Image (tube, rainbow, N blue to C red):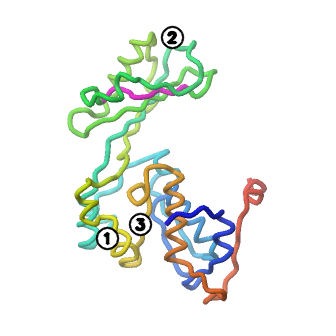
Amino acid sequence: MYDQKSIEDKFSKIHPCFPVNTRIAIVGAGPSGISAAYALCNLGYNNVTVIEKHHSVGGMCESVDIEDPENGVLQLSELEKELFSQVQTIDYYTTVLKIKGLEHIPVGFYYFEEFMDDPATIGNPVAMQRFYSDTNVFLFWSYGNSANVKGSTVLQLAVDAVKRIGGEVEMVVLQRRFKYFPNVNSQDMKDGFYDKIENKLQGQKNTYYVGGLMAFELTERNSSYSMALISKHFANTDPQPGFPYVKVLETENDLNTAD
């Protein structure tokens, strides 16, 4: 579903295949949802609403857990239940610490090589980043396992790592847990998981899915998949549009001017 055309070139040659005032709701304002909304608006759709549970947009940049379907947020079909029951995720933590004694460390991204390859060291930070030279705030990345390596353990292991490199934690600024990298096992893939997603699930009950499970847990891949999905299911390539509409193509200069 990917190609190398620019957004402007791609959307200048296709038209909406539904009335442009069709009500479209996008649940989630992460990179995938925002990209889908952007693509729909570029096509000319004018009744698009993005729904975000959290107080800010950005998805994985500010993540919260999704309500369980049994609590009434989503009503899944049997096919959705079958497919999504196969999905696995990885517990991923970001821990932000205010540290004394590491002022000499330059701004940059650092790996803890000793914790990257050995599964027995899970919970220890695998990377650390200092963003700004005028603050003593550092960000640590760690993996958990939802069983016995959770937030408090991850935090203590990060504090221990700070001590080993000569620092002292003055304050825990925040910690976030992500359900990272949704995936299925190799047998499920062999049994046609993604064929069912693309050929049976997408569009069922007027519902379409985008995100890391459909593409890969990278912003660029999620955005590309979302725009490709909109082009495939919400547009056509007929020379003449099937519905009257006004197309708005925002260029980079337009966006800079708007800012």
First of labels 3, 1 by sequence position: 1
Residue 8 falls in image quadrant: bottom right
**Which residue does the image show at 31% across and 48% down from the upper left?**
89
Of the pair 218 and 165, the residue shown nearer to us: 218
Residue 134, image x and y in percent? 63, 21
Q: Which residue is mark 2?
A: 101
Proximity of marks 2 and 3: CB atoms separated by less than 8 Å? no
Establish if 145 lies above or below 225. Answer: above
Q: Which mark is residue 196?
A: 1
Q: Which residue is mark 3?
A: 209
Q: Secondary structure at mark 1?
A: helix
Q: In the rendered structure, which segment of residues is drawn in magenta? A: 123-130
Left or right, 218 with respect to 185, comes to: right
Query: Residue 170: percent from the left, percent from the top?
Result: 46, 17
Distance in Å between CA atoms under marks 1 and 2: 54 Å
- The three-letter amino acid code for the residue at tag 1 is Lys
Residue at the spot 78% in from the left edge and 56% down from the top edge: 257
Q: Amino acid at mark 2?
A: Gly
Task: Name the residue rendered at 55%, 25% in the picture.
Answer: 130
Quadrant in the rendering for residue 132: top right
* 3D distance between C-alphas at marks 3 and 1: 12 Å
Is residue 40 shown above or below 17?
A: above
Single out the mark in the foreground, 3 or 1.
Answer: 1
The amino acid pointed to by label 3 is Tyr
SS for dot 2? loop
187 to the left or right of 196: left
Quick one: 30 or 117, which is closer to the camera?
A: 117
